[in-house]
Amino acid sequence: MKRAKSIAGRACAPSVVVLSLAASLMAAGPVQAKNCHLLGQVRASESEQPITITFVNSSGMFRHIDWIDFDGNPEQRASLNPGQTHVQQTTSGSPWMVSDGPGNCVDIFMPKKSRTINLR
């Protein structure tokens, strides 16, 4: 069996290197979804106060921006590659969901005033 060098320079079996990498990634922990427990509970509400939200994708990963409608269903409004920005006209009290490429919720925002949201 061919040996791979570990980071410390010692020889180890390739399976040990893979297991060490997997353990390192697991130790870092999964990305924690913030406020995603609110999905299905929050809905857009009638509001007369217009606001502007600027979404800045600082995450280094692809992101979807969804408006959560009056029935509590996400409706896609934008797709952002890393580094892209999307300016959205909306109203105060409208919930917005950020999801990853496969559509998993990353966070839900309910802005009350105009603001910039940096996606991480």
Image (cartoon, grey):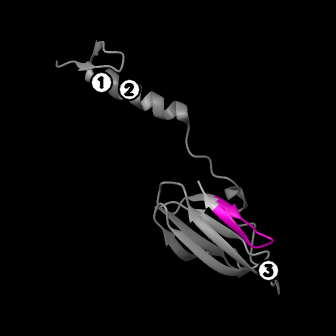
Q: What's the amino acid at mark 1?
A: Ser
Q: Quadrant of residue 54?
A: bottom right
- The picture places residue 93, in percent across and down from the top left corner, at 79, 74
Judging by the rendered image, the residue that carries numbered circle 3 is: 45
Please state the extent of the stretch shown in magenta in the rendering.
107-117
Separation of disc 3 and disc 1 at Cα? 54 Å
| 83 drawn magenta | no
Separation of disc 2 and disc 1 at Cα? 6 Å
The local crowd at label 2, few if under 14, some if 14 to 19, many if 20 or more residues have their Cα within 10 Å, is few
Chain-order first, disc 3 or disc 1: 1
Q: Secondary structure at mark 3?
A: loop
- The picture places residue 55, in percent across and down from the top left corner, at 61, 68
Q: State yes or no: discs 3 and 1 in contact (Cβ < 8 Å).
A: no
Judging by the rendered image, the residue that carries numbered circle 2 is: 19
Judging by the rendered image, the residue that carries numbered circle 1 is: 15
- The picture places residue 18, in percent across and down from the top left corner, at 34, 28
The local crowd at label 1, few if under 14, some if 14 to 19, many if 20 or more residues have their Cα within 10 Å, is few
The local crowd at label 3, few if under 14, some if 14 to 19, many if 20 or more residues have their Cα within 10 Å, is some
Q: Secondary structure at mark 1?
A: helix
Chain-order first, disc 2 or disc 3: 2
- Asked whether the viewer can see residue 87, the reply is yes
Q: State yes or no: discs 2 and 3 in contact (Cβ < 8 Å).
A: no
Q: State yes or no: discs 2 and 1 in contact (Cβ < 8 Å).
A: yes
Q: What's the amino acid at mark 3?
A: Ser
Residue 39 position (above or below residue 2): below
Residue at the image position 50 percent from the left and 33 percent from the top: 26
